[in-house]
Image (cartoon, rainbow, N blue to C red):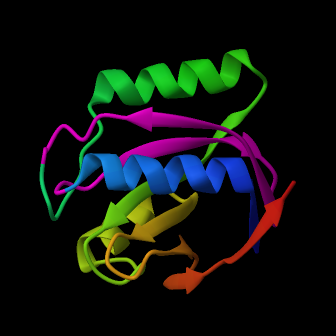
Amino acid sequence: MKIILSSAQLQQLEQLAKDSLPNESCAFLLGGGDSEVTIKEVMPMENADASRVSFTITPDETLRAYRLAESRGMQVAGIFHSHPSLPSPSSTDARFMEVNPVVWVIYSTTANRFGAWVFDDGVKEVKMATMA
């Protein structure tokens, strides 16, 4: 499996993570694809937890994101959030990944790098690619 984002989208997510410090940031990634997921739009969300170690997107905001994606012929193809540690899923992330089977992109605000993961009979790393 692979997720494809533009360099501008990666910059947008990195800036969102830095602007949200000291808290975690979050966003929905809209796009589509099965084994090769292409992101067409980043939809920043407010972290309702306002926390350094967790994030929550409210049910109303989640519904808004799914409706917007559908109205544009896309799907919620990924979930983004930042970590104040390595860009790998926490045990809490792994539990939520199991019920949200999309690609999870994580940006480390300490290592300044991205990682991507999916739950498929366990948490598995996903290759990230950049498009122009």
Q: Is residue 81 magenta?
A: no
Q: Quadrant of the C terminus?
A: bottom right
Residue 42 counted in the magenta span:
yes
Rendered position, 84 above or below 48? below
Dividing the image into 4 quarters, which one contains the N terminus? bottom right
Of 9 and 48, which appears nearest the observer? 9
Quadrant of residue 85 within the rendered picture: bottom left
Residue 52, visible in the rendered structure: yes
Residue 78 place in picture, x, y as percent: 58, 52
Image location of residue 129, percent across then percent down: 78, 70
Residue sitting at 14 percent across and 60 percent down?
Answer: 52
* Quadrant housing residue 118: bottom right
Q: Is residue 42 above or below residue 59?
A: below
Q: Is residue 121 visible?
A: no
Q: Residue at coordinates 19% horizontally, 54% vertically from top-left?
A: 23
Q: Who is closer to the viewer here, 18 or 6?
A: 18
Residue drawn at point x = 62 percent, y = 56 percent: 10
Does residue 80 appear to the left or right of 74 in the view shown? Answer: left
Position above or below: 4 against 59:
below
Left or right for 68, reference 122? right
Horizontal relation, residue 109 to residue 75: left or right: left
Front-most of residues 75 and 14: 14
Q: Which residues are magenta?
A: 22-50
